[in-house]
Image (spheres, rainbow, N blue to C red):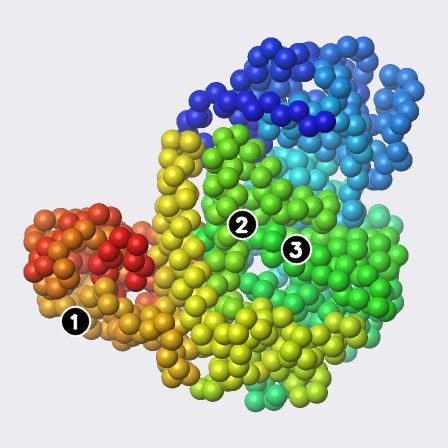
Amino acid sequence: MRILFFLASLGIVAAENGLDGWLRYASLSCTGQCRSKLPANIVVLNATETSPIYIAGSELQIGLKSIYGSHAEITWGKCKASSSVVVGTVEQYRETCGSLSGIPELEEDGFWLSTQGDKVRILGSNDRGALYGAFEYLSMLAQGNFSAVAYASNPSAPIRWVNQWDNMDGSIERGYGGPSIFFKDGAIVEDLSRVKQYGRLLASVRINAVVINNVNANATLLTPENLKGLGRIADVFRPYGVKIGISLNFASPETLGGLDTYDPLDTSVIDWWSSVTEQLYQNVPDMAGYLVKADSEGEPGPAVYNRTLSQGANLFAKALQPYGGIVMFRAFVYNQLNESNWDADRAKAAVDFFKPLDGEFEENVVVQIKFGPIDFQVREPTSPLFANLFNTSSAIELEVTQEYLGQQSHLVYLPPLWKTVLDFDLRVDHKPSLVRDIITGKRFNRKLGGSAAVVNVGTNTTWLGSHLSMSNLYGYGRLAWNAADDPEAILQDWIRLTFGLDPTVLKTLTQLSMESWPAYENYSGNLGIQTLTDILYTHYGPNPQSQDGNGWGQWTRADSTSIGMDRTVSNGTGYSGQYPDEIAAIYEDISTTPDDLLLWFHHVNYTHRLHSGKTIIQHFYDAHYSGAESAQSFLTQWESLKGKVDEERYNHIRHRLDYQTGHSIVWRDAINNFYHNLSGIPDTSKRVGHHPWRIEAENMNLDGYKVYTVSPFETASGSIAIVTASNDTVGTATTKVDFPSGTYDLAVNYYDLYGGKSHWELYLNNHQIGEWAGNSEDVLSHTPSIYLDGHSAMRIKFRGVMVQKGDVLKIVGKPDGVEPAPLDYVAFLPQGVVD
Ligand code: GCV
């Protein structure tokens, strides 16, 4: 029976900066019956300080004290009969405390948790499992859950890794939470306290390895000095049961080793890697293994020597075999393509490259496959490679860092997206073949398998750059352990642990998080067309045009009448034929292809009718309006929690959600304008291109400002903005307001560029309504832009302003650096209107 004490949080904790993530152990009141369930002692069956069991003991002690103010004494290695929580391995328990019955055989890293009032047993199959069990029990306590339970929990797969794309200079590729916690100036940092805290967070969601450097790897990681640094990092992670792995640069024997080749079959190269591997294991005796990106996006690989990818992977696999290490070999291999070739298709690359090599990889190679065939888009079909490797182990690659999905400046809760793939049944040989059963090795009887996620935490106290994004890291860990878990249930555990037990907070945050991915998909790219972000620059704001006309193969093939990639076998690239028959048949036929992937598989006219009955183009328009509208509600939903969440996090999150409401409108208008312009088809609801509540900046009286044509055109209202005449001219834009008198929210759309902090002031009849600075590069997390475009476009809102018809609106813009105080328009929004 699940006993939940609905415990009150003991007041709102002041100033939370996010460093503890979901492991805050926030204080709960507990009296009477509740108190009797708190163990008075902690029995720790392993007293070695570097053991995860030791950490488990101290976490339990800290947790009990911090949550319930209850001091539990730690006893080392000796059983106590009453009121105690015992933590150790099953074996240690049998040796120290006597026989045990009723516990099923546990798998590696699994644990048994039994709670009977104040008698709790947490027994791992190994040290790591015991620590996981302790975190599970603490998670129950922190959620006020005192249920009597007795169950075993086992991982669904041995590989539960995270990847960091950290560079040696301390920057992080696609990282939005500040610089690296591992590297700085080409070396490993001295102070590893953040590494320890990261290990604690990862262990609590049962992640067992971190690859600490970018897959676009720098060979200098392998210098003797840095090898020692790796040893230090591994020492810090080890007590948390987290191993380290490293990414390798295929050309290292040449660039670092001074050989004149890096041919994987050359004996000098083989010897070089064996020697490097040996030195690595001298410094890191339990290293998890290597991660390799080869022959992809300019990275060197075996193709340079006409060798196969399996020959490349096996070079490392053999070097690792004496030490039990694993090679995670990325399937993200593709070439530049020519769009004028109708059959060319980047989505086919992984199967084309890897299927012929199935069975040629050493047993300790795991092919790491991105969830979809292109690149972490807002929606993709499941990568068909999962259904094409039967004699090779595989793992799924997910992306916690929100590269194409809002870069942590937008809230997007990702587990529901990941579940579309994990739960997808590929019907290999007409048998159930869920992706989650393929990657765990169950479906094709593979010993290895699992998942990896690109996380990219940084030194920011929020880790990822935003408090709410941490639900994605938490969710990833939970799904890596058990991909059958429910994203909403996972989310709710995270909310209770992160924000406390208030039912209103729980309900509100659940709602807005669960709505966030559908909303983002709606206001970015729909129907399987991909995210439609700028793929040639920051991967952040809208730029549909950037998908086409280049060799990257993320094409939409949009023209004035039609859109979509024809990936059928009958008339297109043949990609749908890479799936097993049952699935191929569904995607081959337009009538059975689900609407949300229609444009991934078919090239159709904008007037094509979806199953929903709408035309493609009207669906685009409607979805963008509906997505942006949902995003507006995120802010109001969050604001309803004022006073229920500590002020520091409340304000931080409020600011981001406020930004998201504005940027969702930038997205909505840019995408709608673009396709409206291209197709010439009007919006049946007459919204696109009609903005009755806007005053365009270029139509105001300008002094010191000049008109500027924005590119891409669709990222400015009416394609035109204004900028100051020079970098040291103050600009003024004035106009008479012609709207009926009343109360309005005033929304100003402007551009905040990297390279300056302009300052704007907004007046009505010379009375200042507000002022603001172009400093989002300091306070938001996404990659900033140096141009007026969909990345830099944003909106600020002043609410409840009394306006009289005929009032004079004035905006004064002071440029700074290269930022010329750009302005797009001002919207006068009556209550309930989003324009
Ligand atoms: C680390 C995408 C990203 C790159 C990344 C690459 C990869 O292309 O934009 O930053 O490189 O994927 O996964 O290797």
Counting from the top left corner in percent of width and height, residue 189 is at 56, 42
Instruction: Give the residue number, with chain letter if any, for mark 1.
Output: 699
Nearest to viewer (mark 1 / mark 2): 2
Instruction: Write the residue at 7% across / 54% down.
Output: 765
Q: Please tell me which residue is depicted at 56% across the width and 44% down the height of the picture.
A: 471
Q: Mark 1 is on which residue type?
A: Asn
Query: Which image quarter holds the C terminus?
Result: bottom left
Q: Quadrant of ligand 1?
A: bottom right
Q: Quick one: which residue is furthest to the front in this view?
A: 613
**Residue 543: x, y in percent?**
43, 71
Q: Is mark 1 within 8 Å of ligand 1?
A: no
Q: Residues within 10 Å of mark 2 (few under 14, many from 20)?
A: some
Near-viewer residue (123 or 731): 123
Q: Nearer the viewer, mark 3 or mark 1?
A: 3
Q: Amino acid at mark 2?
A: Met
* Residue 493 in view of the camera: yes
Q: Are marks 2 and 3 in contact (CB under 8 Å)?
A: no
Indicate which disc, 1 or 2, sits on the residue closer to the N terminus.
2
Q: Nearer the viewer, residue 595 or 418?
A: 595
- Residue identifier under label 3: 419
On the image, numbered disc 2 is attached to which residue? 514
Q: Earlier in the sequence, mark 3 or mark 1?
A: 3
Which secondary structure lies at badge 2?
helix
What secondary structure is found at the residue carrying circle 3? helix
User: Which corner quadrant of the image does residue 816 belong to?
Assistant: bottom left
* Image quadrant in which you'd find residue 527: bottom right
Q: Earlier in the sequence, mark 2 or mark 3?
A: 3
Query: What is the quadrant of residue 760 in the picture?
Result: bottom left
In the displayed structure, would residue 229 be above or below residue 292?
A: above
The CA distance from mark 3 to mark 1 is 48 Å
Horizontal side of residue 158 vs 498, given as left or right: right
* Circle 3: residue type: Lys
